[in-house]
Amino acid sequence: MNPYDDTYFMKKALQEAEEAYKKGEVPIGAVIVANNQIIARGHNLTETLNDVTAHAEMLAITAAANYLGGKYLIDCTLYVTIEPCQMCAGALFWSQISKIVFGARDEQRGCITMNTTLHPKTKMSGGILEEEASQLLKNFFIEKRNLN
């Protein structure tokens, strides 16, 4: 049996989300995998970098492209704790990533709700460690509200 399954890699994405949480960033984390190996990691850094595009997925896409030496992420899988937003889904479209696996849905701003088109060859599934991903996000915003 392969120990490197969707749950294993989603746990790694959750570790990235926890890093974002510690920095006061919206706790979303991502890893990109090729051949059962993590080739890129990212977590939200929009506040740290003062950059609205510094989402976990965007940073991971750039890191993966640098690792591979090319812009296409064919035969790669993105594991991200929350369903990608429209911007990230657009970047994932252009990267031609083979698979996207997310934890929890983003019912308000996610690419499914926004009806964003993915690359025709990209497969997407969700619900992996959904409760953990969702709870981390909820805790973050509860804490933010209580500080203000």
Image (cartoon, rainbow, N blue to C red):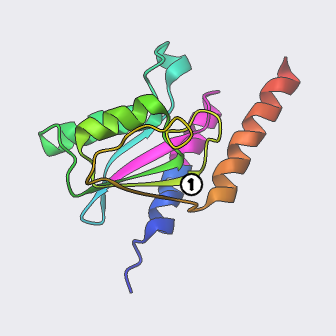
The answer to which of 117 and 49 lies nearer the viewer is 117
| Image: 35 above or below 137 | below
Residue 59 visible in image: no
* Residue at image point 41% right, 77% down: 3
Residue under numbered circle 1: 103
Q: Is residue 19 left or right of residue 100?
A: right
Q: Which residues are magenta?
A: 15-32
Task: Name the image quarter holding the C terminus.
Answer: top right
Residue sticking out furthest to the left: 69
Residue sticking out furthest to the top: 50
The amino acid on which the numbered mark 1 sits, given as a three-letter code, is Gly
Residue 86 visible in image: yes
Q: Is residue 57 left or right of residue 146?
A: left
Q: Is residue 141 left or right of residue 50?
A: right
Q: Any magenta on residue 47? A: no
Residue sticking out furthest to the bottom: 1
Task: Name the image quarter holding the N terminus.
Answer: bottom left
